[in-house]
Amino acid sequence: MTARDIQTKAMKLPRKERSKLALALIDSLDNEDPAEIEKMWLDEAERRYRKFLAGGVKAVTAKEAIARGRKLLQR
């Protein structure tokens, strides 16, 4: 069973059960080893940097990034 299969089934649960499941999943993330979390962030940063160097993404200023973030939060 894939994560997508689980998600599809979970979305059919009543709202209260989905909420409990979501909280349990989030809580499970807090049990990660801090060193492993740091490694995952470093891996992600390196992946994004390689994509930037390859021309796969365009850089924006911090001001523009913050403005975009604020706009998304207002939705």
Image (cartoon, rainbow, N blue to C red):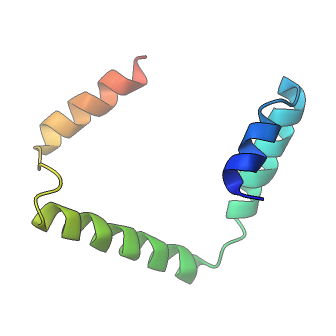
Q: Quadrant of residue 46?
A: bottom left
Question: In the displayed structure, does residue 26 sit left or right of residue 63?
Answer: right
> Could you tell me which quadrant the N terminus lies in?
bottom right
Instruction: Judge whether 24 appears above or below 40 on screen.
Output: above
User: Is 70 above or below relative to 20?
Assistant: above
Give the image location of residue 56, x and y in percent: 17, 56
Q: For the point 58% across and 77% down, which residue is it?
A: 34
Give residue 72's position: percent from left, percent from top.
37, 25
Task: State the residue at coordinates (83%, 25%).
Answer: 15
Give the percent coordinates (x, y) of residue 43.
39, 75
Q: Does 41 sit above or below residue 55?
A: below
Q: Seen from this angle, which residue lies furthest bottom?
A: 35
Q: Is residue 24 above or below residue 42?
A: above
Image quadrant where one finds the C terminus: top left
From the viewer's perspective, tell me whether residue 20 is left or right of residue 29: right
Drawn side of residue 35 relative to residue 27, left or right: left
Task: Give the side of residue 69 with respect to residue 28, left or right.
Answer: left
Residue, x 24% and y 36% (percent of image)? 66
Q: Give x and y (percent) for residue 67.
A: 22, 29
Residue 17: quarter of image: top right
- Residue in the image at 82% along x and 35% along y: 18
Total marks shown come to: 0
